[in-house]
Amino acid sequence: MDHNFGADEVWMRQALALAEEAEAAGEVPVGCVLVADGEVIGQGRNSPIELLDPTAHAEMMALRQGALALGNYRLETATLYCTLEPCVMCAGALVAARVKRLVFGARDLRFGGVRSKFQIADSLVLNHRVEVTEGVLGAEATILLQRFFFANRSSRRDAANTPTTR
């Protein structure tokens, strides 16, 4: 498939900005932008802690907005730009929504449902296959995630080493 990788980077930069918002809110820094016909129809950032909702992943938030914007749960013309490889839940939602294309930045080596652990989005055993492009601004997405997890480990280590007063 011939795609405009310049446009992919533009949309991915918007997703990275949403990931930074998630990080500022104390969430794992993942952001998504859902685009159809050259326009954003949905966007999301990780929010499970804030919303007390284990399904409030960036992808799910963007898909929900997109379905409302189009008035249809099928998003057959849409491309989802996500900073991190979707998990199994989100990859399944992409298939259920009939998303045309997924573009993601960094692989999720622990929970990836598209390439790293499973290949749900374009599995031959399912009734819909999502076209997948990976690695767009992947270095930037990886740095954001590494920074977040390093800061969390450091703050937990600092808290564990701080004497408590009773």
Image (tube, rainbow, N blue to C red):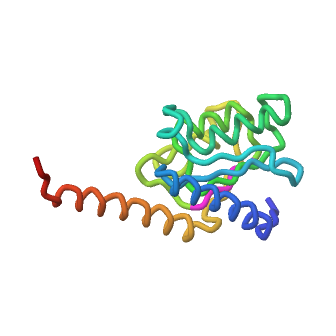
Overall secondary structure of the magenta section = strand
Q: Is residue 133 above or below residue 143?
A: above
Q: Is residue 161 above or below residue 92?
A: below
Which residue corresponds to the image point at 84% horizontal and 47% vertical from the top-left? Answer: 36
Which residue corresponds to the image point at 60% horizontal and 48% vertical from the top-left? Answer: 45
Which residue corresponds to the image point at 60% horizontal and 34% vertical from the top-left? Answer: 92
Q: Residue 105's quadrant in the figure?
A: bottom right
Say how many tags the image has. Answer: 0
Which residue corresponds to the image point at 63% horizontal and 53% vertical from the top-left? Answer: 82
Expressed as whole percent of the image width and height from the top left, the position of residue 123 reads 61, 40
Residues 71 and 122: in front is: 71
The magenta stretch spans residue 43: no
- Look at the image and tell me in which quarter the N terminus lies: bottom right
Span colored in magenta: 101-105
Expressed as whole percent of the image width and height from the top left, the position of residue 77 reads 84, 43
Residues 66 and 154: in front is: 154
Q: Is residue 66 above or below residue 7?
A: above
Residue that protrudes farthest toward the left in the picture: 166
Expressed as whole percent of the image width and height from the top left, the position of residue 71 reads 85, 29
Q: Residue 90's quadrant in the figure?
A: top right
Expressed as whole percent of the image width and height from the top left, the position of residue 46 reads 55, 46
Q: Is residue 164 above or below residue 140?
A: above
Q: Is residue 13 left or right of residue 153?
A: right
